[in-house]
Amino acid sequence: MINHKHKSGFVNIIGFPNVGKSTLINSLVGENISIITNKPQTTRHRILGIIDQYDYQIIFSDTPGIMIKPIYSMQKIMMQYVKKSFEDADIVLFTTEIGKFYLLNKYLSFLSFLKEQKIPILILINKIDKIGVVYSENMLYDTINYWNNFFPNSEILPISALKNINQDLLINKILDLLSKGPPYYPKGILSDRSERFFVNEIIREKIFLMYKKEIPYSVEISTEKFKNGKNSIHIDSSIYVERDSQKGILIGKKGNSINKLGYFSIQGIENFFSKKVWLRLNVKICKNWRSNYKKLQNFGY
């Protein structure tokens, strides 16, 4: 039966690094579809997460954190994802956080571009759970006034993606702005990404959490084997680095580091798929992959 009152649309989440965009989409969708660490540039791809109800379908899009001067070809592609998110958006959720004032001058050109868009923009002030712990309530009012001066025609909503504060209110505001229309994806689909993609992301998340300095930013994951059985999954994945020294750091003395990485990766993959996982990791060298468009294309960029 066709529901003529059904609403649908694309709601794209953009914002600065480490303001909680990935935490927000995970909280809204109810699954960890986007990896989270405390390091900037953790998110590299544009990831869709879908909320389905009988009378609406909201397709959320998580995007990489905004970079003003991308260096590598990979970073330039990441910023293309952000730009493209304006082309198909019905609503933009511009996400910042409580206490962020210094960013205005640094990101003035981007914010001016954002201000010129005709798309409805909701300004989300994230991490308000820090009120009473790190900040006073006055800091929230100061942050709201700060962004209201720059976006006087946009509605501002304080939220906590981590604690789900004002999440229902956010959904209601989105539904008020969306138009009637049929679903874009079959009902029940969580994301447009493949199972192998989520395996790659889980392994990459563990690398971000375990390793320091340039290692997390120099790796890319490719899953060559994904055999999904009834009760278990057998996976072969390769970790690509740019230099021999990085390979040595990843593997560690007597293989201790790569074994630890495999252990934590298996835990994450098992939690995601709710199945027993057998994982084999290989470390390979792919020189300058971050600056080679052909190699980036092979990696799914």
Image (cartoon, rainbow, N blue to C red):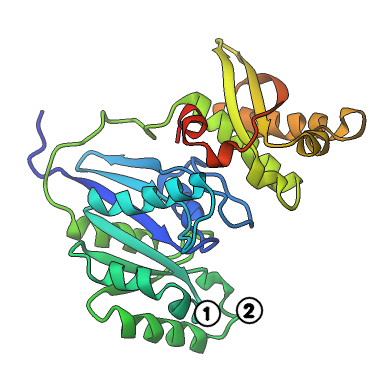
Q: Position of residue 80 (x, y in %)?
A: 37, 49
Q: Position of residue 203 (x, y in %)?
A: 64, 34
Q: Position of residue 17 (x, y in %)?
A: 52, 61
Q: Which mark is residue 134?
A: 2
Q: Which mark is residue 99?
A: 1
Relative to the observer, which residue lies in front, 13 or 232? 13
Q: Position of residue 221 (x, y in %)?
A: 60, 31
Inspect this view and state whether residue 271 appears.
no
Residue extending farthest right: 254
Asked if the residues shown at circle 2 and circle 1 are in contact, with their CB atoms under 8 angstroms apart, the answer is yes
Element at label 1:
loop
Decide: few, some or many residues near mark 1? Use Cα within 10 Å; few <14, some 14-19, many ≥20.
Answer: many
Element at label 2:
loop
* Residue occupying the point 81% across, 29% down: 259
* Residue occupying the point 30% across, 67% down: 122
Q: Which mark is residue 109?
A: none
* Residue occupying the point 22% across, 64% down: 120
Q: The disc labelled 2 sits on which kind of residue? A: Val
Q: The disc labelled 1 sits on which kind of residue? A: Gly
Relative to the observer, which residue lies in front, 104 or 248? 248
Inspect this view and state whether residue 88 appears.
yes
Question: What quarter of the picture does the C terminus occupy?
Answer: top left
Mark 2 or mark 1, which has the lower sequence index? 1
Dividing the picture into quadrants, the one containing residue 283 is top right
Q: Does residue 16 sit above or below 98 in this rendering?
A: above
* Residue occupying the point 51% across, 64% down: 19
Dividing the picture into quadrants, the one containing residue 270 is top right
